[in-house]
Amino acid sequence: MKLLDRYIFRAVATTTLVALLALVLLELFLSLLVELEDVGKGNYHFMAAMRYLLLIQPQRIYELFPMALLVGALLGMGMLASGSELIVMRAAGLSLTRLTRSVLQAGLLLSLAVILIGEFVAPPLEQFAREQRAVAQGEDLAIRGGRGFWARDGERFIHVQGVLPGVRLTNIHVFHIGADARLQTVTHAQGARYQSGRWLLEGVDRSILDGDTVLTEHLNSLAFVSAISPQILEVLAADPSKLSIQDLQIYVDYLEDNGLDAQNYWLALWRKLLAPLTYLAMLVIAMPFIFGPQRSAGTGQRLLLGLLLGLLFFLLDYLLGNVVLLYGYPPLVGAILPSLLFLSAGLYTLHRLR
């Protein structure tokens, strides 16, 4: 990396990290106000709430980084513009393209660290935090808004009310549908645990439907082989946007193998895979405001501009994601279109400034 690249990297990295810290602290404060409503529930005391919030911060860093990168690029390069350093660089023969490339290099180096956090650090900490919070509040791990979840496993439809830490299930119903589309058996278990590649149901009541006859039996335990593994359960217990690429791919394969709708998880997967393009778009859209007519703007104006552009991007991302899911368009369209719009706008404006 040349001297100029290192200098620009230091300017962009410093302001980006400061912006990220400010956004994370603001989000932490707002989240604390929400968590205080649950303090006192079971063993969930103030320190438990703080521990939960600290454990989920890597995920918040991953989510807030695009806006922090945009603000950091505006402020970092803006300070160079305010000190007439960019004018000196241009006078020395450095083109707008060359300076933009240095900014992109700086931003993408920072992005690599954040991508690693979002893939390997944030998902397990988020899952652990949710489990500890559920235990402290004396509840099962909430899934699908506390109503449990439904899953399909071949000819069986399974409903699980709750998941406990340690991969234990509570209040399970299994409905077996035959090839003739008729209900054959209904199995209810008080609990289940996973061992040796299968589920062991406990406290089982099973009803076998044979024509007009219903046979019932009670079993202390029953081995149950299912495609629903502990990995699948971890995915079910989490928001798709908070899962790693590997976990998303596992659940997408599971859904498609069972003929279920995987669009929501495909959208989350594409957003993860296209994160570098999002970061690139954030940097490119910032450059026209540094080299264009707004280069003399103050720090407060640049900060406000960065926040507004970041909010606009997140709004577009949210709206287009829901539109493609609602109308059945490919999830890739919803994941890539906001970044392409910002990237195209930034490149077109930069071209006009050359």
Image: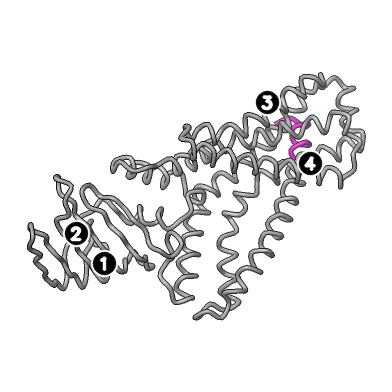
Dot 2 falls on a residue whose secondary structure is: strand
The amino acid pointed to by label 3 is Ser
Residue on which the image places disc 3: 344
Residue on which the image places disc 2: 224
Magenta region, mostly helix, strand or loop?
Answer: helix
The amino acid pointed to by label 2 is Phe
Q: Say whether marks 2 and 3 touch (CB < 8 Å).
A: no
Relative placement, left or right, of 264 versus 70 is left
Give the CA separation, mark 2 to mark 3: 53 Å
| Mark 2 neighbour class, 10 Å CA radius: few under 14, some 14 to 19, many 20 or more | few
Which residue is rendered at x = 40% and y = 70% of the image? 140
Q: Earlier in the sequence, mark 4 or mark 3?
A: 4
Which residue is rendered at x = 15% and y = 49% of the image? 178
Give the CA separation, mark 4 to mark 1: 55 Å
Residue on which the image places disc 1: 192
Q: Say whether marks 1 and 2 touch (CB < 8 Å).
A: yes
Q: Quadrant of residue 296?
A: top right
